[in-house]
Amino acid sequence: MGILSGMNTNEWISAVFSPTGGCEKVATAITRGMSVRKLDLCAPVAEQAVTAPLLAVVPVYGGRVPEVALERLRALKGNGTPAIAVVVYGNRAYEDALLELHTELTANGYKVIAAAAFIAEHSIVRTIAAGRPHAADCELAAEFGQSVATKLAAGDMSTVCVPGNMPYRDRPQMPVTPLTLESCRGCGRCARLCPTGAIPSAAPHTTDASKCILCMRCVAVCFRRSRLLPPPVLEGMTQRLNLVAAEPKQPELFV
Ligand SMILES: Cc1cc2nc3c(=O)[nH]c(=O)nc-3n(C[C@H](O)[C@H](O)[C@H](O)COP(=O)(O)O)c2cc1C
């Protein structure tokens, strides 16, 4: 009996690490019209066996997958289970991230039957790839989802190869943490939503640099816009990215 017999391939599990919403938009577009159970990787997940197709969507940080997203994905155990590996990047490059995600999922018991790299607004320099994923990206994502569903319905468990190099690039060192302006009223929203627990709830105007991965969620979720990157750092990154990430990239699909 094949691994798909007895498996409900019509309902997917969508496990997404999306501090600022770009990965979430891509995951939503891929699963348009499908029945989905969502798992938010921005919060700890309980160890569990996954018995439905797993869609894993993560952002690219310095050409790699953020370690915390991989750790949480490791709690989701596959057993010959089909998986769809998707990385989302800010129009610079995704380098080794898709290979890293593919390799992790395979080591965790999945068969990676499809993969993709999509583009979303750069979560640090929001003028890069602003507005992406745009309507055409989302249309392509929905078509990708449909073609994977068709592959599953046909019982086709063939795996895909993806680009990337081993050993992977070194993980980027985070030069700074976001700073907090005096307008902060200490509401604690950033502390509650920080994926790595880097903002103490008792002192939400501070940041634990040893835990911060610079995911920009605190900046994105603050209603008072009290959190931001130090302006000279943002300025430097903007200049660098304008040189290498201005030309729009296209999504890449592997089915
Ligand atoms: C710390 C950090 C590093 C990043 N590194 C890259 C990168 O190497 N290449 C790239 O194209 N985009 C990079 N980005 C942009 C994100 O991959 C992109 O904005 C992604 O959509 C963020 O996902 P989210 O909106 O779900 O948080 C980086 C963003 C952050 C916060």
Image (cartoon, rainbow, N blue to C red):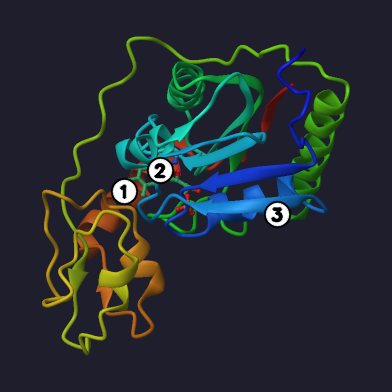
Q: Which residue does the numbered mark 3 point to in the structure image?
A: 134
Residue under the point 40% across and 37% down: 75
Is residue 148 shown above or below 191? above
Look at discs 3 and 2 and give the one toward the viewer: 3
Which residue is more in the foreground, 3 or 101?
3
Side (left or right) of 195 relative to 19: left
Residue in view at x 60 percent, y 46 percent: 14
Mark nearer the N terminus (1 vs 3): 3
Residue 213 % position (x, y)? 25, 48
Label 3 crowding class (10 Å Cα cut-off): few <14, some 14-19, many 20+? some
Q: Does residue 199 sit above or below 83 in this rendering?
A: below
**Mark 1–mark 3 CB contact (< 8 Å):** no
Residue 34 drawn at (x, y percent): 79, 50
User: CA gap, disc 1 to disc 2?
Assistant: 6 Å
Residue 131 showing in the rendered view: yes
Residue linked to disc 1: 237
Q: Quadrant of the N terminus?
A: top right
Q: CA distance from mark 3 to mark 2?
A: 20 Å
- Secondary structure at badge 3 equals loop
Beta carbon at label 1 within 8 Å of ligand 1: no
Q: Residues within 10 Å of mark 2 (few under 14, many from 20)?
A: some
The amino acid sitting under disc 3 is: His
Amino acid type, mark 2: Leu
| Nearest to the observer: residue 55 or residue 22 | 55
Picture quadrant of residue 88: top right
Q: Is residue 121 visible?
A: no
Query: Rounded to the nearest whole Å, what is the CA distance between mark 1 and mark 3?
Result: 23 Å
Q: Please state which of residues 3 and 147 is positioned toward the viewer in this rendering.
A: 3
Question: Which quadrant does ligand 1 occupy?
Answer: top left
Q: Which residue is mark 2?
A: 241
Asked if labels 2 and 1 touch by Cβ distance under 8 angstroms, the answer is yes
Could you say where residue 208 lies in the image, as x and y percent from the top left?
11, 58
